[in-house]
Image (tube, grey):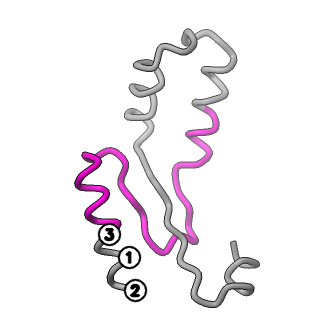
Amino acid sequence: MQDCGQLISDLNVIFVSVPMEVTLQRIIARSRESEDNPVFQQRLIRAQENQTLDDADFVVDNSVSLQTAAQKLLNYMLSL
């Protein structure tokens, strides 16, 4: 991320965050694979590894309604 910031001086990093319990509920609701499937387990591991991004300038909370998240993102972008 730091390399990008050096190349693009006005770069703003936006991170979309969702709590693990919401991620788990969404993965289960999609019914793409069973909980004992390795792909299911890999999705959970990736989600756990990507819970935060310290370099983010703004964090979108993806556990709220789409309208709420979109409005907050829009407000942030308009403030730049």
* Residue 25 counted in the magenta span: no
Q: Magenta includes 63?
A: yes
Dot 1 falls on a residue whose secondary structure is helix
Q: Which quadrant of the rendered structure holds the N terminus?
A: bottom right
Q: Do the residues under discs 3 and 2 have CB atoms within 8 angstroms?
A: no
Residue 7 at x, y percent in the picture = 74, 85
Kindly check if marks 2 and 1 are in contact, taking CB atoms under 8 A apart as contact.
yes
Amino acid identity at mark 3: Leu
Q: Is 60 on the left or on the right of 66, as rendered?
A: right
Q: Could you tell me if the residues under marks 1 and 3 are in contact, i.e. CB atoms within 8 Å?
A: yes
Q: Residues within 10 Å of mark 2 (few under 14, many from 20)?
A: few
Relative to 79, residue 15 above or below: above
Mark nearer the N terminus (3 vs 2): 3
Circle 1 packing at 10 Å, graded few (<14), some (14-19), many (20+), is few
Q: Position of residue 12 (x, y in %)?
A: 53, 77
Q: Name the residue under label 3.
A: 74
Q: What residue type is labelled 1?
A: Met
Element assignment for label 2: loop
Above or below 62: residue 55: below
Q: Nearer the viewer, residue 75 or 59?
A: 75
- What segment is highlighted magenta in the picture? 45-73
Question: What SS does tag 3 mark?
Answer: helix
> Which residue position is annotated with label 2?
80
Per the image, the residue denoted by label 1 is: 77
